[in-house]
Structure formats: structure tokens, C-alpha cells
Image (spheres, grey):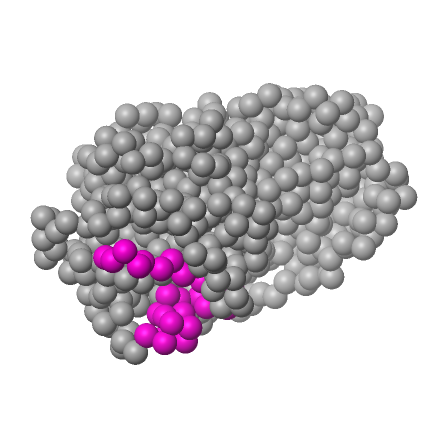
């Protein structure tokens, strides 16, 4: 039901999308300019029934509004949508019908079933949305509890309504919502304000600004509204843990766990597994901290650069319970018994991942399909499908299947010499000598005596890992666990691959790409899944055919990342069997000369009440999810417009491009068209309805010709 507005929005485009372009700009809509017509004292008694209300008394308040409203998620937290129809708008007897939007999701359904309008669908939609004369008006009121009780007056982006008509509608409706502040009140935000739906409506509103002010009609754009938030609830939930305040630098060396709740002064490049996050810095829905919180289903709050409350800071170092709801949070001291009961109750069901090891080749994207994910992972399989769909706008390449990772685990041998060398490496990286000695001793303990006395003691990498992670001290000692996992990665990086495999991999890269650089991208069976995306858990690296960074050497770094502390802790949270994880690798040419990069969500997650897509875009190669210098990306929604075009809704400028959009209008239109093509194609593969399905798509803008290149597609977890 979440996307009913999006579904309806696309349906109404079919019959009359072109009507606005044929409207007569001289049409006089100012039939309600007489202030007497909106004097509350002259209004009749309001109807307040099950299907509709015609007005709200002062004592009704926001609670009554919420009872009629359909709840919807936005970047400002949960909002409440009440749709309305105004009949006989061009007369002195206009009636405002506030719809019970929980019961009637579409304007037409309400008009037909409650108002007994005999018009067919196409005729109703033309009159309500596209007829410049506007005898019937249809729109939506959006209540934002997190923004000082503001209520927005909105219309579909393709509605032909003009500013003078908007002003008349605003006066009619505000005069029937008596719980709002009166006009010219100092409580200016407790008002009904007009929020233009896109760039075209924003331009029209700006040109009509003087008239809006004269009529006392407040106007806020999306960017103004979204930029005025002191605190954002990024992800709801409940958590128990020790409240700890850390800087990004401190977090780099701190050992934290799922029993810690972090207060972050600045956003880190990566966020380890923790119970909840509270940041002083602003976040976006696609920041790494929030993506991790959504994937883990852990609470996340952003204070948008404002000072953190003293009441919150006073609890640092204490075991607390944090409850985060749609528009508020509550934190207080908890007992260990309460916390342990919560942790036990919320433990997840064990998961053993599936895979297919039958493919032992190096498989071209052309020979892979969506179902190949069982042998090469979702990322590689989706890349192959993406290249079939967009051969000119996506990389071509091949996959190194799960087989080669699994085979390496069997033939790679851990020796006593490697135990000694890893001990030295452990200390060089700053770990306590006592912890490093524990790891070394454990390492040697796993090595079996050989059958042939001339052979050194050793163990297969697979048996070595299984025994190390099964130790009791590994489970209970976080610092030891981190050091053991580093030791396992050391083994991966310092045991050579089989000569036949290494030669074949290097030769294939040399044949396809010559001396050009390539990307070796992780593609496991524990990422990019429909309910767990594993974003940022595993490593991707660059390689060339030069001796110092051959693919046959560099691939071991990708394989080793299965055993990073971050990835292990994440899987532990989800109770995933670590030994069932398999790593494939997608190989394609590296991206040179990157002008911009971006992440797209194929639903308008900033405002589900308006169809469209949501984009974070940044200049050059600067990361969107993990910016090293705290750079903020540009945030826009791209929504349909008239004549088959699109318009952008600016929510935030990039700090690297504060005065202008990063993409041109033509590029935004091209981006939207290609994304819609990807959405339809992958929705079919995932057996989902396109308007009720969301993808997470990564793209780049390349070279002086500014070519759009799409590099990843995966399900977005809403």
C-alpha cells in the first residue's frame, strides 16, 4: 500500500498529460480573492463523518487530522497525508472534502463512491488535474510532525494548477482547519503552507512571490523545509548498550561491538557493528552510517550539526535503553538483566548460505545470467544482466566463480613459518603483545604433524579457520577475535594461488584489457540479497598486468576480506554460518576520468507521496557513502513532468557544488530514462511489480563527453 500514490500517479498520466501545455495563461482563476469568502464566522457547521470531513474545529487538533491520514515515510520522518477534493471551485458555494485517506486512497475512488460523481476516470482526471478552468480541484495535505507542526499543501507534479489558483485553494482550506494558527500569527510555522512539487512549480511560485505574500500564503520549497530540521530520525528501533562518545579518529582504533551505542562527533568512513548510532553531523538516507543501520535494523539519529542535548551526553559510559520512534527518541539508564533479556529475545534464526561450486572456469558476462548468482554471487550476475540491457552504458567483463575461493581454502597450507610472520605483523599494526602471543600460540596449536616426517607441520586454510573461530576465547574476547581475523587475512594474502589458476587469470585480463587497469570486485553469496545487502562489507581492489599488482596476487585481498572484523561481526549479528560464505570476483576495466558519481534509489524515498526516483550525486570520485572529508552530496528527487519530461526537486546542494546542480537538465532526463529502463528490467527478473519495488543503482559520469555509466544494481531494503 505504501506506493499507492506512485501507482496512481503514473496511471493518471495516460489520458491527459499534454493538457497543461495547451492551457490559456489568460484564464482568470481569481474567484476567491474576496477575503469574506474565507471568514470562518460565515462557515456552516462542518460535516465530520466516516468517509469525509468538511472542516476541523480548533479543539479537533492534529490528532483528528491523523485519524483521516495515510502515514507515509519521508526524510523528515513519518508524515501524514490527507487528500482532498474541492467541488464547485469556481463558485461561491465551493465545498472542501477532506477525504478519509485510509479508506479511500485515490481521488477518483472517493469521488465515485462518496460524492457519487458519474464521470468516467479519464473525464474526472482531466477536470481535476488538467483543465485550466479548475471547477474541481484535487490535492494532498501533508502533516510533518517533526517540522514544528507544519502542514503542506501539495499537488501532483503534472497538475496544471497555477499560483493564483493555489492561493485561492490555500485560503479555502486554511479557513476550514481552525486548529492551525490564524493568519499573520507569530506562530508562523503552525500554518498551512504551499510546497511546490517540482522545479517547474517552484519557478512559477517564485514569479508569483509578491502575490503570495500579499495574500499571506506561506511558501516553502523542499530544500527550505528539509534544511530547517534540527534532528532527523534516520532509522527507528530499540537498542540496549553502553553509550560511548567517539570521534571518527578514535573509532578507527576503538574496539566496539553490538552492545555499544555510539555518539559520533563526525561521520566515519566506515561504521562497525554497533547497537545504535547517534551523529552530530547531518546524514542522508544513503550515507554509510544509515545504510548500515537500515541493513542491521538498528536505531539511527542525526542532529544535523546542532549541539547534542546535555541530558544525552550525561549518560555516556552507562548501560542505556534507546527507543527511537518516527518523530522522537527516548533514552535512559537500563539494568544488565534488562539488556540481557533483550539481546536473548532478539537473537536471529541461524542461516546457512547456499552456493554452487560446479563452475570452475573464468566466465564471461555474456555467458552469465540472473540465475548465475548461485555460482558467482548477485553482484556479478546483476552486472552481467546490466551489460546485456545497457551494452554502451555499463562495463563488460567476466567472473571468477565461488569454486576458486573454495578450492584455495582446501589447497592453501598454514605453516609454522606463517604463524611466526603473522605474529610480527600483528605487533607492527599496534596490537598489544599479549594478544598477539595468544594468536600465535593458537595458530601453532592448529598445525597437525605430517604423515611424512620430511614435510613441515601444517593445516589446510579451511580447517585452520574453522578451528580458530570455534575457540571459546575467540567468542568472548573482542580484542582477541579482531586479532585472529587479522591473522586469517594474513594467511590469505601470503599463500600463493595455484599456478594454473593464476596464469589463466592474468592471461585473460591481459587479453581483454592489455595494460589498462581493472577492478576486482567482491561478489559473495552474503551480499546484495533481497533482505540483506551487505553494503561495504567486502573489499574491491585495482589490478594491472604489471608484475607488482597482478590480478593473481591482488585477488587474494578480495578473498581475504570475507574475514574482516567488520564483515564477521555483521554476519554474526545475522547468525550466518561463516564457513558457508563463498567469494566470487567480478572483473572489468577500471573507470578512468570520473567527472561525477551517484547513487540512485528507484523510489522517491524523500517523499513517497510523489512518484519518482531519489538521487545522491557528488563531484568527481568523492565518495557519497563514505566521504573522507565530510563532504555532503547533492540530493535531488527526479519526478515526471508534462510532455513526458522530468523535473528535479532540490533537497540539498553538494558542498563541492554549492551554487548549481552537478548534472545538466539533459543529463538528468537521460539518467531518469535509463533508470526507468533498469527498473522495469530487474523488476521482472526479481518477479516484482515495478512500482512496488526499489533498486539501489550506482552510476558514474565519465570523461569530457560526460557519458553515463552504470556499475551496480541491487535490491534496496526499504
Q: Is residue 247 above or below residue 584?
A: above
Question: Residue 471 magenta-drawn?
Answer: no
Q: Is residue 150 above or below residue 645?
A: above
Q: Is residue 146 left or right of residue 163?
A: right
Question: Residue 108 magenta-drawn?
Answer: yes
Q: Quadrant of residue 414?
A: top right
Please report the residue visible at 44 percent of the width from the left and 66 percent of the height from the top: 105
Q: Is residue 346 left or right of residue 329?
A: right
Where residue 341 appears, as percent x and y from the top left, is 86, 50
Q: Answer whether residue 270 is visible to the viewer in this image.
A: no
| Furthest residue toward front | 42
Where residue 573 appears, as percent x and y from the top left, is 70, 49
Q: Is residue 672 left or right of residue 400?
A: left
Q: How many numbered discs?
A: 0
Please report the residue visible at 18 percent of the width from the left and 58 percent of the height from the top: 133
Where residue 406 appears, as percent x and y from the top left, is 60, 57
Most foreground residue, 711 or 298: 298
Please report the residue visible at 53 percent of the width from the left and 68 percent of the height from the top: 50
Amino acid at each position: 500500500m505504501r506506493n499507492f500514490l506512485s501507482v496512481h500517479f503514473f496511471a493518471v498520466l495516460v489520458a491527459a498529460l499534454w493538457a497543461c501545455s495547451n492551457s490559456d495563461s489568460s484564464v482568470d482563476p481569481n474567484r476567491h480573492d474576496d477575503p469574506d469568502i474565507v471568514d470562518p464566522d460565515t462557515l456552516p457547521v462542518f460535516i465530520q463523518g466516516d468517509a469525509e470531513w468538511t472542516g476541523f474545529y480548533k479543539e479537533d487538533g492534529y490528532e483528528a487530522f491523523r485519524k483521516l491520514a495515510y502515514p507515509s515515510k519521508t526524510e523528515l520522518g513519518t508524515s501524514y497525508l490527507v487528500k482532498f477534493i474541492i467541488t464547485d471551485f469556481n463558485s461561491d458555494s465551493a465545498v472542501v472534502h477532506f477525504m478519509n485517506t485510509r479508506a479511500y486512497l485515490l481521488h477518483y475512488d472517493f469521488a465515485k463512491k462518496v460524492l457519487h460523481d458519474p464521470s468516467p476516470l479519464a473525464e474526472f482526471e482531466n477536470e481535476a488535474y488538467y483543465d485550466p478552468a479548475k471547477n474541481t480541484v484535487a490535492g494532498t495535505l501533508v502533516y510533518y510532525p517533526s517540522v514544528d507542526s507544519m502542514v503542506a499543501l501539495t499537488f501532483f507534479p503534472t497538475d496544471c494548477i497555477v499560483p493564483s489558483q493555489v492561493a485561492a485553494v490555500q485560503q479555502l482550506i486554511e479557513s476550514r482547519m481552525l486548529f492551525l494558527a490564524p493568519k499573520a500569527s507569530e506562530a508562523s510555522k503552525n500554518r498551512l503552507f504551499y510546497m511546490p512539487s517540482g522545479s517547474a512549480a517552484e519557478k512559477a511560485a517564485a514569479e508569483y512571490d509578491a502575490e503570495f505574500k500579499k495574500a499571506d500564503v506561506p511558501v516553502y520549497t523542499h530544500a527550505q523545509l528539509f534544511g530547517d530540521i534540527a534532528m532527523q530520525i534516520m532509522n527507528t528501533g530499540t537498542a540496549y548498550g553502553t553509550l560511548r562518545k567517539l570521534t571518527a579518529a578514535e573509532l578507527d582504533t576503538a574496539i566496539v561491538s553490538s552492545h555499544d551505542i555510539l555518539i559520533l562527533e563526525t561521520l566515519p568512513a566506515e561504521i562497525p557493528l554497533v547497537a545504535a548510532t547517534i551523529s552530530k553531523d547531518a546524514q542522508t538516507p544513503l550515507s554509510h552510517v544509515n545504510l548500515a543501520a537500515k541493513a542491521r535494523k538498528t536505531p539511527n539519529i542525526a542532529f544535523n550539526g546542532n549541539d547534542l542535548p546535555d541530558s544525552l551526553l550525561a549518560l555516556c559510559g552507562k548501560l542505556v535503553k534507546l527507543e527511537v520512534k518516527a518523530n522522537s527518541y527516548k533514552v535512559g539508564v537500563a539494568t544488565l538483566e534488562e539488556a540481557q533479556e533483550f539481546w536473548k529475545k532478539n537473537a536471529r534464526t541461524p542461516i546457512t548460505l547456499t552456493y554452487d561450486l560446479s563452475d570452475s572456469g573464468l566466465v564471461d558476462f555474456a555467458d552469465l545470467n540472473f540465475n548465475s548468482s548461485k555460482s558467482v554471487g548477485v553482484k556479478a550476475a546483476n552486472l552481467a544482466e546490466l551489460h546485456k540491457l545497457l551494452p554502451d552504458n555499463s562495463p563488460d567483463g567476466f567472473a571468477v566463480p565461488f569454486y576458486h575461493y573454495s578450492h584455495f581454502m582446501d589447497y592453501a597450507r598454514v605453516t609454522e613459518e606463517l604463524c611466526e610472520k603473522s605474529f610480527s605483523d600483528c605487533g607492527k599494526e599496534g596490537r598489544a603483545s599479549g594478544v598477539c602471543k595468544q594468536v600465535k600460540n593458537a595458530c601453532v596449536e592448529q598445525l597437525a604433524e605430517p604423515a611424512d616426517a620430511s614435510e613441515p607441520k601444517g593445516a589446510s586454510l579451511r580447517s585452520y579457520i574453522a578451528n580458530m573461530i570455534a575457540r571459546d576465547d575467540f567468542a568472548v574476547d573482542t580484542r582477541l577475535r579482531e586479532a585472529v581475523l587479522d591473522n586469517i587475512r594474513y594467511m590469505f594474502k601470503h599463500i600463493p594461488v595455484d599456478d594454473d589458476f593464476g596464469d589463466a587469470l592474468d592471461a585473460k585480463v591481459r587479453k581483454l584489457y592489455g595494460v589498462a587497469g581493472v577492478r576486482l570486485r567482491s561478489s559473495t553469496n552474503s551480499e546484495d540479497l533481497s533482505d540483506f545487502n551487505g553494503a561495504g562489507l567486502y573489499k574491491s581492489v585495482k589490478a594491472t598486468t604489471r608484475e607488482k599488482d597482478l590480478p593473481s596476487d591482488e585477488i587474494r585481498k578480495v578473498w581475504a576480506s570475507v574475514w574482516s572484523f567488520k564483515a564477521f561481526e555483521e554476519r554474526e549479528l545475522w547468525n550466518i554460518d561463516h564457513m558457508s560464505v563463498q567469494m566470487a570476483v567480478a572483473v572489468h576495466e577500471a573507470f578512468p576520468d570520473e567527472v561525477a558519481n551517484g547513487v540512485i534509489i528507484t523510489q522517491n524515498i524523500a517523499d513517497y507521496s510523489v512518484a519518482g526516483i531519489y538521487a545522491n550525486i557528488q563531484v568527481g570520485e568523492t565518495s557519497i557513502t563514505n566521504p573522507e572529508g565530510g563532504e555532503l552530496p547533492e540530493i535531488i528527487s527526479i519526478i515526471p513532468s508534462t510532455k513526458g519530461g522530468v523535473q528535479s526537486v532540490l533537497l540539498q546542494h553538494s558542498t563541492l557544488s554549492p551554487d548549481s546542480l552537478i548534472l545538466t537538465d539533459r543529463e538528468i532526463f537521460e539518467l531518469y530514462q535509463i533508470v526507468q529502463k533498469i527498473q522495469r528490467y530487474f523488476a521482472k527478473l526479481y518477479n516484482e511489480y515495478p512500482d512496488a519495488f526499489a533498486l539501489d543503482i550506482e552510476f558514474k559520469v565519465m570523461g569530457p563527453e560526460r557519458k553515463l555509466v552504470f556499475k551496480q544494481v541491487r535490491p534496496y531494503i526499504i
